[in-house]
Amino acid sequence: MSQIKQYILAFALLLCFLAQSQNTVNDDPEIIQSNINHRIEQATDYLEKFNYHEAQKNIDDALSLAIEADNKKSIGIIYAIQGKLQLIIEEEENAINSLNEAKTVQLEIKDYANLASSYKILGEVLISKGDYYQALDYLKSSKNLYEQEDIDKGIAEVLLLEGKTYILLKDYRKARSVLEQSTAVSKKTGLLKTQSEGLINHALVYNKLGDSLKAVNLSNESLQIAKRNNFVAVLNEAYLTASDIHNSIGNYQLSRDYLNRHLKLADSIKNLTRMSSTREQETKYLIEEKNDRIKELEAQAIEEQEDDGVRTLISILSVALITILSLLTLSLYKNNNIRLKTNNMLHKKNGELIIAKEKAELASKTKANFLSTVTHELRTPLYAVTGLSNMLLEENPKPEQIQHLKSLKFSGDYLLTFINDILQINKIEANKVELELEPFNLRKKINNIILALNNSADDNNVKIHFEYDKNLPENFIADQIKISQILINLVGNSIKFTKDGDIWIRIYQMEIKDKIYTLRFEIEDNGIGISQEKQDNMFESFNQGSIQINRKYGGTGLGLSIVKGLIDILKGEIHVKSELGKGTTFFFDIPLEFTVSKEVKESKTSYFDKENMTLDLTNVKILVVEDNKINQMITKKILTKMGLKCDIIDNGTDAVEMIKTNEYNIILMDIHMPGISGIEATKRVRAFDKELTIFALTAVTIEDKMHEFEEAGFTDIIPKPFKQEEFEKKLYNALASKDKPATA
């Protein structure tokens, strides 16, 4: 009878276990949320206590409950905590995957407060991987969200991480500035742990900057706060940093004492740490433990075969085994449901990503077509504006007209610069900028840039100083045009924002490997400076300090974006240091290849100078195919000044017939015309004449259209409005390549 009671009791226990396992399904939403919150708190608490095994168990339980309840906010928080744990146990790739899951959910439900936390942890993971600049990007995003949500605790922690990152980058002055902000926010809000950690890192920075007394004082203050509040991890870091500081100032005894304390505390932390890396290992461990226990009980049963209680023990053991197997089956069932839900969510997100990608590609094509149309429509009248203003200035205008014509020319040049900047930004974003490597003299190039900008500097009463490392060679192989454009933009900016001051240009060597020199370029001024807020996004397109600055100083807001893009193409990096009212320093590092050869000599600027002309232009004939009457007049006048004769036709169909019945040396073909286009006309010409030189004289310069010109058979492209020197050079080279110019 007693044996039956024992069976009944065992099965009752089994039913209790099964009922308890189903409570999470049957509980109401408030109880489920309470359970989720409790497990999240437990997981966070175990992380603080270095008990990673228990932390993982609570994370798994919380995630299972949250997914069943479809509580997206909790799911995002749990994935972020999972990422934090994986970072601690050095599973960086798994951490990134978990944090990406958290980001996806939080962006979907606009949970910006917890999204800021996910960005912060992702920044920590990237710091651990050594990807410091990408880490800074995520930390800045996190800080912006914390500021948006007015969460001081998060702001202080992110500033602390930024400071640590700048220490790793050895930018100690930047680290000092950021850590000062972190300490100030921590003190204001009573965040003692963040304050203590910030102080010890601050001490490390001051030690690196040579202020040992300040470093020791900050170190002592950090140690006092950490000891008083039992911040074990911070105290461990503080002991090690204090040891390094005292060692650097020659106080070796105290340095050894702090080092011994650090080692003792580190061993203690290590003993506290218990982690389980995977769920499979944990399951395997449990099964092995149960199997060992079963074997032990079976051995006892064999030894006590003659005892009446053996059967009872075997029955209890059987019930226990059934219970364990039932629980494992239930666990597998739940895990399978979670996996199915997760897979469905992933498929849904993948579909959304594909749609987003298609929309982005469509937007990119639309933007390219829009730029092609707008730039063509703007460049065509600009050709008339710049051409006519140049011609009028050269034709001895009345004194009272000169200023008006110069203003007209300036406005045209400004608009053309703006259009070219937009086009260059488009090329950089589309990765269509190619490097043109050639030998050049770097020192001479910078001197020429300074000479070109001296007039602007004189207008603002600014003096430019140039410092070139005397041990640095002068001849390098690189894309000198892009380097010139970077320097002109940066020095031009300094001139624009400096009044009655100085600008320093410095070039010196950072490192050398084989023939590759990594050079540091610095442009420093004592102008109006830039606020910290504006520094965070100053390299973005169309970004300016303010509307007032734009009105006062002018500019399109594209210059620094172009500079950043060009430096990236040259495999360099750019940074900025600035303080309002005191000035700004831009510095960038780029690799250049040393060469012993001299730079390529510049060709003469006037190709059709009558005194130096070597070509016989007597019988040279050019056909201009252009439908705009003003452009016809300007082009003809330019060619006449060069000593060249030309015919003009206003449509593609008649142009083809004239080419068939006349012998021309060069064709200047517009693209957009009534009737057939310049592209179609060129294709028809190529059907009977493969050698004739045909230039596309067009305002279309977007690279996506270039393949159409090549397929049509154009020899080259001359964009409108063209530079006089470039126009002359292309015509001269085309005529010089012919042994005997064609005659009329």
Image: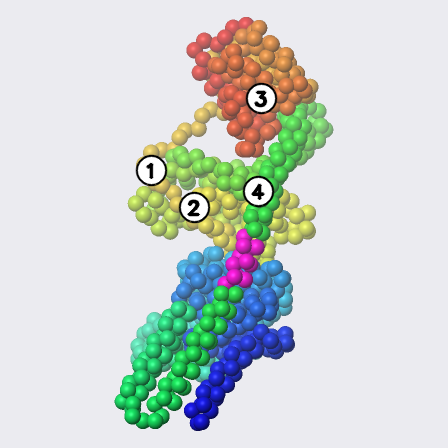
* Marked residue nearer the N-terminal end (4 or 1): 4
Task: Calculate the distance from the C-alpha at mark 4 to the C-alpha at mark 1.
Answer: 42 Å
Task: Calculate the distance from the C-alpha at mark 2 to the C-alpha at mark 3.
Answer: 38 Å
For label 4, the SS is: helix
- Residue 502 in picture, x, y percent from top left: 53, 50
The numbered dot on residue 595 is: 1
Q: Which of marks 4 and 2 is in front?
A: 4
Q: Nearer the viewer, residue 300 or 385?
A: 300
For label 3, the SS is: helix
The numbered dot on residue 571 is: 2
Compared across the picture, whether 31 is left or right of 399 comes to left
Residue in the picture at 63% in, 68% down: 150
* Marked residue nearer the N-terminal end (2 or 3): 2
* Marked residue nearer the N-terminal end (3 or 4): 4
The residue at the far left in this view is 303
Range covered by the magenta-colored residues = 339-350
Q: Which of marks 3 and 4 is in front?
A: 4
Task: Calculate the distance from the C-alpha at mark 1 to the C-alpha at mark 3.
Answer: 43 Å
- Residue 741 in picture, x, y percent from top left: 48, 9
* Marked residue nearer the N-terminal end (4 or 2): 4
Is the residue 138 above or below the residue 155 in the image?
A: above
Q: Nearer the viewer, residue 265 or 629?
A: 265
The numbered dot on residue 679 is: 3
Q: Residue 286: say if magenta.
A: no
Is residue 8 visible in the rendered image? The answer is yes
Compared across the picture, whether 250 is left or right of 530 comes to left
* Marked residue nearer the N-terminal end (1 or 2): 2
Looking at the rendered image, the quarter that the N terminus falls into is: bottom left
Query: What's the amino acid at mark 4?
Result: Glu
Local crowd size for mark 3, using a 10 Å CA cut-off: few (<14), some (14–19), many (≥20): many
For label 2, the SS is: loop
Q: Residue 348: say if magenta.
A: yes
